[in-house]
Image: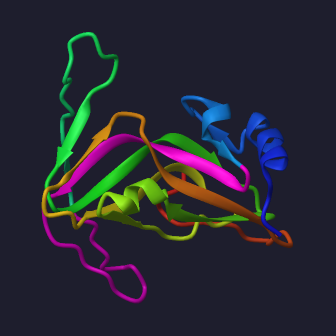
Amino acid sequence: MVLNREELKGLIEDGLVQDYPHLETQLTPNGFDLTAAEIHRFDGEGKLDFSNDEREIPGTTPIEPEKKDAEDDYSWWELEPGVYKIVTNEIVDIPKDLVAFAFPRSSLLRMGAHIQNGVWDGGFRGKSEFLLKVDNPEGIEIKENARINHLVFLRMEETEEGYSGRYSD
């Protein structure tokens, strides 16, 4: 069953999501919006095999946002068409009886960009990273802390072994 706003609010206040800029703004009727803390360019190729023994994740370089107005508290990233890595402000700490799926915010889609995500497994703890693809030939601009990705949480029977990959804290 998908968790609603009220259930999520209680779980977030108990630590499900941490380091969020503004709880009431980020809560939705059926999920939680993650915000952009960093945007990176990829520096090289990656490698993926069956066992992950030969897996290589390419390096990235952060793109520095720029202020448009000296009075503004936050800066903007100007993104040309291409593929980028987004790092969120939030840390998620998913218990073993929840799983999360993410979807791009519809505003992002209307601008000609979309996000690709993995599954947030029960037992995962850490900052989220995902792929942003800008298809708009004119590019897009994203402000620091913009709500960009929408997490939907589902309850499941608790699993004995949660996420144990290299990306969890």
Counting from the top left corner in percent of width and height, residue 45 is at: 16, 72
Compared across the picture, whether 125 is left or right of 83 comes to right
Counting from the top left corner in percent of width and height, residue 119 is at: 56, 70
Compared across the picture, whether 60 is left or right of 108 comes to left
Q: Is residue 107 above or below residue 35?
A: below
Provide the residue span drawn in magenta: 29-58
Please tell me in which quadrant of the rendered image residue 143 appears.
top left
The residue located at (54%, 48%) in the rendering is: 126
Q: Does the stretch in magenta take in 96?
A: no
The residue located at (25%, 78%) in the rendering is: 47
Counting from the top left corner in percent of width and height, residue 92 is at: 61, 48
The residue located at (28%, 66%) in the rendering is: 57
Q: Is residue 1 above or below residue 72?
A: below
The residue located at (78%, 40%) in the rendering is: 9
Q: Main secondary structure of the magenta part?
A: loop
Compared across the picture, whether 47 is left or right of 53 comes to left
Q: Is residue 123 in sight in this rendering?
A: no
Residue that lies at the very extreme toward the top in this rendered image? 71
